[in-house]
Image (cartoon, coloured by chain):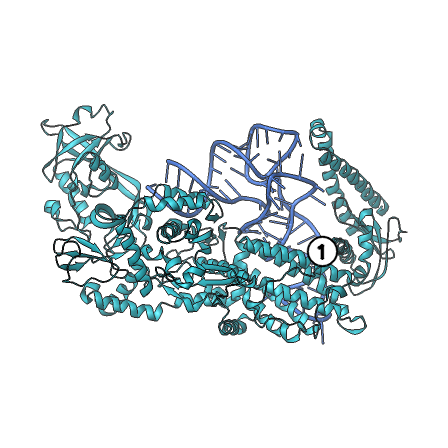
Chain colours: A cyan, B blue
Amino acid sequence: MASRYEPGTVEDAMRARWDASGLFTPSGDGSKPTYTIMIPPPNVTGVLHMGHALNGTLQDIVARHRRMSGFDTLWVPGTDHAGIATQAVVEKKIYAERKLTREDMGREAFLSEIWDWKEEHGNTILDQFKRLGASCDWSRTAFTLDPNMSHAVRVAFVRLWEQGLVYRGARLVNWDCVLQTAVSDDEIEYVTKAGRLWELKYPVEGEDGRFLVVATTRPETMLGDTGVAVHPEDPRYADLVGKTLRLPLMDRSIPVVADDTVDREYGTGAVKVTPGHDPADYERGARHKLPIVNILEKDGTLSEEAGRFAGMPREEARKAVVKAMEELGLVGEVKDIEHNVSVSDRSKSVIEPLVSEQWFVKMEPLAKPAIAAVKDGTLTFKPKRWERVYLDWLENVRDWCISRQLWWGHRIPVWYDEDGTPHASTTDVEIGSAHPKTGKPIVRQDPDVLDTWASSWLWPMATLGWPDDTADLQRYYPTQFLSTASEIIYLWVARMVMAGYAFMDDREGGERCPFSTCYIHATVLDAQGRRMSKSAGNGIDPLDMIQQYGADAVRFSLVMLTKEGQDTKLAPEKFEMGRNFVNKLWNASRFVLVKAGRLPAFDASAVETLEDRWILSRLRSTIETVDGHYERYEFNDAANALYRFVWNDFCDWYVEACKPRLEGEGADSVAPAVLGRVLADILAMLHPLTPFVTEAVWERLRAVSETALPEVLAGAPFPTTDGLPHDADAEAALDAGRLVVSSVRKLRQQNDVAESKPAKVTVVVLDGSRGPALARAEALVRRLANLEAFTAGADPSRPAGAAVDLAGESPAAFEVLLDLEGLVDKEAQKADLQRALGKVEKQLSGVEGKLGNESFVSRAPEDIVARERARRDELAAEKERIEGLLAALG
RNA sequence: GGGCGCAUAGCUCAGUUGGCUAGAGCACCAGCUCGACAAGCUGGGGGUCGAAGGUUCGAGUCCUUCUGCGCCCA
């Protein structure tokens, strides 16, 4: 074994071993309970980023832990076809290579190009999850455009259709002029931009020379104005309500209406109403029955409705409109302002609200059971605060615009006859066949596709075979654990819950809910606390980190850095922590495997020595603690507990204590057996966190262990506490021993005495209750502190010329005297005692202050007061002791 | 505009229900080439817990306000 752990030489081999074992495909063993996780399908165009790496790690920890805990565990991987993103990538590529647009190629040819691209590049991100160690059932890898998914999507659509929940409507949608599609509210970002606020003057009809002044940041939209609104209680405009204005440039009459949504303070207090191009105006227009004028084409140029401005791109039109108004002398004040502009998530172009025909799903009836699921505890979020976010969205849910003007996706399963009467069908309808209702020939299918989320909301069901009642669906639905990012709580999590309740309607109540725990993981930020993003270029590539530090180090570090979904700042060097720990484990294992030789079977009844009983007692409580943390998804706590146990207990003390028992005259057969047992349990407990190194060490452990160990650690049972002692006395003894050993080491350094030189030590036991514990630890102390003489007692004879240290602070449990026959470094001794004195005095004054407070003594619980009194006495004694020692130094 | 999160050692973070001495890793200082590990070992120094009020015998922890940073939603 190399003295350094080399992940590069191990990871591929371990992955191959897991693949060959078939362990990640659940057995279907009906005697076992099931445990199911669905991966949040990353975009098929995606590459692994830190968020994926963290989320993949967390899911893998759960999957591996549950698998080892006896669950028939299924973790389904897959990817999302990601309509807009994927189409854009391929469109761009084709244009760059061949100067062809999708219209040039035609629908069929273009889609076939995307499929080709998907076949070639679509597995990238899943391969990256494999490198991370994800124990998914790769044989069940799913894709949201798979044939069975398409079938599921159509069945779901038609069901909603039949329930009257799908409707087509002329609605104001968020239009992306670059991608030429409607995008949902959830696909919009708001950015603050510099802009201008223009005042425009509209002449009042019938009152020559009188104008109503409106303010706008988008002057070109005036071409679509169909009214002006003022506040009903605004005295400035009271007499104008009901009158009409002459809309300049368009030369049409528009009414002045009173609407209490108008903010009297903003601008002039009069707002132009453009129902075709502003959401608030759309509402106002509807209230006052104002017509809708659509002045924009889908490509962002102005339409015929814009009169002489028709055909201009929107930016150009803005300038032209302002110029034309200026020429008429109808522009008032112009101010530079900062305002929020909506921008498309995908193309980053400014969103233009415009009226268009789209398909919508009524959400309210679907939201109800999803709200109830959280309220009645069927579904819990972790951390719990995200429940509020989920509920707020669902309680104010808006209808879902599900049509997208794209080609890549599930085509909307709606066909029209020659009159445009729609018909929804789960199977293809032949052009020319008769419409089932009207009998007229079907002439075309709806050209649009469904929003990507309209397939991924079926993910937990459809990947298991829904709408067919498959064995998988029966056995593995509902799932237990969904881990995802906070930003898709609405987009995805809430919709999956709605779909579960809407479509798994042959199940009862909570059995419909697609998962019982929704874990929202931390957001990984850069070292400055900014979100990592491709565009900011501040991302840390997980694959680089895996390359540099190893997959286990990346996993372990991420878990150590992220407590319970609390966002974390990350820098590359943070992975050193994980790497160092993995290396420490590797070397401790190396010690056991190389030094101990054959490892006899562990026999609890043969264990007698202090250190053996102690480490087994600690092992016992560590197993309990860690198992509980994994169970409750407290990953960071599990990692911390293991870190401490492995490094601070096992390596620092147990291995050191064992050394003389492995070779030469002190050799016994119990120590190797205990080492073997503890190491095996450490590997198994750590396996969910660091699967590669533990699997690699396991292989070597099996080779030298006389205990029958399962061939593959990933399939081994999680450790139990069976046969392990709970020994509080042993733990107390070891703690006492540790204190004294550390004290001796400190005195050696202070007085420049080499560790290798046997020393004489006398311990004055100050805390009588700890005397027996120290007595029990004597052999251990002699060995680890390298002592040739050791005396301990309540009042032993003190050697003259000894260096002294108080072990266990405030109050000290032991006074440790290192016999130096007068060669004490008095200055160092003095400085050390002074420091100790300072501390004690500070604490003593604190305690005395408390006890001097009459209300504390009379009102605090008796036991607390008694404790403080005892502490005061102890501290006073300690103070006196230190002063005595200082006086003796002169 | 609404909501949420964070502020504790130089840095990154823990700190359960208020109660003995506020912890860890990194960094820092000093000493260790003793056969698992220098990605290590041993010892050490370092914090009036963002600010101001309040509740309480007692506040890092509970309440209010404020400041700074970040995120989500409109």
Quadrant in the picture for the C terminus of chain A: top right
| Residue furthest right as drawn | A797
In the image, residue A731 above or below residue A665: above
Asked where in the image residue A620 lies, by quadrant, the reply is bottom right
Percent coordinates x, y for residue A41 in the rendering: 39, 60
Q: Is residue A499 left or right of residue A250?
A: right
Percent coordinates x, y for residue A351 in the rendering: 26, 48
Residue situated in front as seen by the camera: A556 or A320: A556
Asked where in the image residue A106 lies, by quadrant, the reply is bottom left
Residue situated in front as seen by the camera: B57 or A463: A463
- Name the residue located 42 percent from the left edge and 60 percent from the top edge: A474
Q: Is residue A552 left or right of residue A530?
A: right
Badge 1 marks a residue whose secondary structure is: loop
Percent coordinates x, y for residue A842 in the rendering: 72, 39
In the image, residue A154 above or below residue A170: below
Is residue A716 visible from the viewing direction of this image? yes
**What chain does badge 1 belong to?**
A
Q: Is residue A323 left or right of residue A598?
A: left
Percent coordinates x, y for residue A699 in the rendering: 60, 73
Residue situated in front as seen by the camera: A168 or A85: A168
Residue, disc 1: A726
Task: Say what amino acid the circle numbered 1 marks.
Answer: His
- Name the residue located 73 percent from the left edge and 58 percent from the top edge: A614
